[in-house]
Image (cartoon, rainbow, N blue to C red):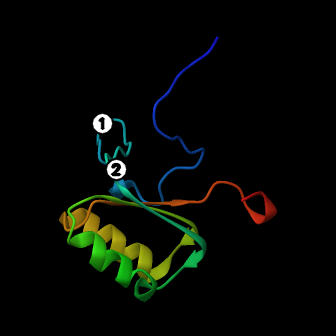
Amino acid sequence: TISYVEGMQFDRGYLSPYFSTNKENMSVSFDDAFILIYEKKISSIKELLPVLEKVLGTNKPLLIIAEDIEGDALAALVLNSVRGALKVCAIKSPGFGDRR
């Protein structure tokens, strides 16, 4: 059997349930989103500020794929998402080590 699915699917989920856009099935769906792929851990919001400032002016959602997002960086993203200031979702990158 062959299945055709448009879009992209990840084995891992988002880092916080507050990022979900569909509260019924707790999923995230963005159209025409910016995608930030970062190969390291993000633990400080200062690392994301230049990107966030540019995205805020466009009213487009942002998908962040990183090794990990923790600390005040994750807290700030969740807070902005809950307040509706920014449509954002953060996920851990699929794979690890040399398999990334």
Observer-nearest of 48 and 19: 48
Q: What residue sits right under mark 1 in the picture?
A: 24
Task: Check disc 1: other Cα within 10 Å, few if <14, some if 14-19, many if 20+.
Answer: few
Spot occupied by residue 85 in the image (x, y as percentages of width and height)? 19, 68
Q: Residue at x 50, y 41 (%)?
A: 8
> Is 18 displayed left or right of 13 in the figure?
left
Q: Residue at x 27, y 60 (%)?
A: 87
Spot occupied by residue 20 in the image (x, y as percentages of width and height)? 34, 50
> Is 62 displayed left or right of 96 in the figure?
left
Q: Residue at x 23, y 71 (%)?
A: 56
Spot occupied by residue 17 in the image (x, y as percentages of width and height)? 39, 54
The answer to whether residue 27 is above or below residue 66 is above
The C terminus - image quarter: bottom right
The answer to whether residue 5 is above or below residue 66 is above
Spot occupied by residue 57 in the image (x, y as percentages of width and height)? 20, 72
Q: What residue sits right under mark 2 in the picture?
A: 20
Q: Amino acid at mark 1?
A: Glu
